[in-house]
Image: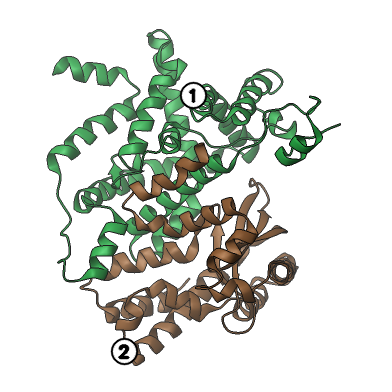
Chain colours: A brown, B green
Amino acid sequence: MIVSQGPSLFTMSKNATFVPTLSRRACLAAGGAAVLTAVAMPHKAIAETALEPATAFIDKTAQSLMAAVNGSSPGAAKAAALEKIVEENVDIEAVARFCLGRFWRAATPAQQKDYLELFHRVLVSNITGRVGEYQGVTIVTNRGVAREDGVAVTTTVTRPNNAPNRVDWLVANETGQLRVIDVIAEGTSLRLTQRNDYMSFLSRNNNSVQALIDALRQQAAAPK
Amino acid sequence: MPDVLSRLAALQPLRAVGLVAALALLVLTGCATQPPASDADAVAEYRETNDPIEPTNRVFYAVNNGLDTVIIRPLATAYRYVLPQPVRNGVHNVLSNLGNPVQLFNDMLEAKPRRAGDTMMRLLVNTTVGVGGIFDVATDWGWPAHDSDGGMTLALWGLPDGPYLFLPILGPSGPRDATGFGIDYGLSPTTYIGRGPTVDALGYARTGLGALDARSAVLDDLDKITSQALDPYATIRSLYRQHRQSQIDDAVADNRATVPAWFPAPPAASTASGARIP
């Protein structure tokens, strides 16, 4: 009875930010089989990305992540190893396009190219810049759940002196290979947060993609 | 009017400031410019953001940021520097144990009996075995913590979150969560214990420690957000809403059976509901 109140919460809400969350909950409630029938047609990602390979992929990525950050090598070497893992396992272009939202189409080809390159640099440096904090981290892979945009693999991430965190990795294979397209830490999606950041920046800068690119260029140049 | 103010002042001070400023907010309201109807994408985005008084919110965001920079952040940094982790954990545990009665009420209002049971056992076990709540024994004994508050209760009752509000001192909120905050204040047993210097001092200490505890826990994360985001205000708005939604989703999804493990339930029902049979 309470569950049935959930969706009404969203239909009443004008806030479309929650639409992905609504779909996720609908998916959970309906169960795997129903989800496949309901969303397989418009979203081919699910049919192509089965649960098991996605879970195995995340498990393997988690193992290499732990090996990279928990070793005894100096910080710079760890950052380099981490960067390699990010390059190989994250579909950075897909994340970048998602974050630019409706402005991707508005951008000129040259702007798209600049944007992708800068997004790539900023993302990698944001991740590798925090390598010291990951020391002692353990990641336990749990299970995968089908979503309309891929498979969400749930993991439990534990850092020393911190309560265990639930981190979901959204996996898709749009490029023909399994790649991470989102990280959802304790229910907050990194790519959605990033998109909201960019959208707000754009609306305060006359919707100018060039202004965003300039700001990213500054970020990329700033010392970490 | 002075009577109202003195009553407000009798509340815990930070909350009183928050309420006064929230009233001021209603007076000062500035509105975001709605995009022209011809631009469908922009209109959809405006609705999605659901922040009609964004200019006012941004003013309070800036005020809070100023207060944070000169007062709260330095204090939280000092707090983390001076006290070792185990002590800070103990403080955190005591504070969250003090919040358990309110949480218990909310679990019940949310019609989540197993959650209410968890909170009840946490209160009993941690207050006694956990020495007044300093040690979180209950988690190890199988009664883990969860989130539950007035805003979540209203959400489970079907209330939408409404437009975004950035409240002075209290930070990110909305009509539903601000109302929930008031409900929690009304539900708290400590609201009704007598007045006097000792009670007041304990109340101030609890509020102050609560602020230090909460702020020191997010020192690094908040620094990262403000340095990495192009628009920290929008990033915090997004994070707040996603976080609230995930708390609500967790509560909605928590439908553990209420049949005790030892109860001889019919086999079919017990497997379906996930109840354990010894």
Q: Split into 4 quadrants, where in the image is the C terminus of chain B?
A: top right
Name the residue at 65% across, 48% down: A164
Q: Residue A97 carries which label?
A: none
Residue nearer the viewer, A90 or B198: A90
Relative to residue A133, is residue B164 depicted above or below? above
x and y percentages locating residue B77 in the rendered image:
48, 45
Name the residue at 34% across, 87% down: A111
**Helix, strand or loop for disc 2:** loop
- Tell me which amino acid carries mark 1: Val
Q: Which mark is residue A108?
A: 2
- Tell me which amino acid carries mark 2: Thr
- Neighbour tally class for label 2: few under 14, some 14-19, many 20 plus, Cα within 10 Å: few
Q: Split into 4 quadrants, where in the image is the N terminus of chain B?
A: top left
> Numbered disc 1: what chain?
B
Name the residue at 48% across, 55% down: A21
In the rendered view, does A22 fall on the left or right side of A102?
Answer: right
x and y percentages locating residue B250 in the rendered image:
55, 44
> Numbered disc 2: what chain?
A
- Neighbour tally class for label 1: few under 14, some 14-19, many 20 plus, Cα within 10 Å: many
Q: Which mark is residue B102?
A: 1
x and y percentages locating residue A190 in the rendered image:
49, 63
Residue A136 visible here: no
How far, Cα to Cα, is label 1 from label 2? 55 Å
Relative to residue B9, is residue A94 depicted above or below? below
**Helix, strand or loop for disc 1:** helix
Seen from this angle, which residue lies furthest right?
B278
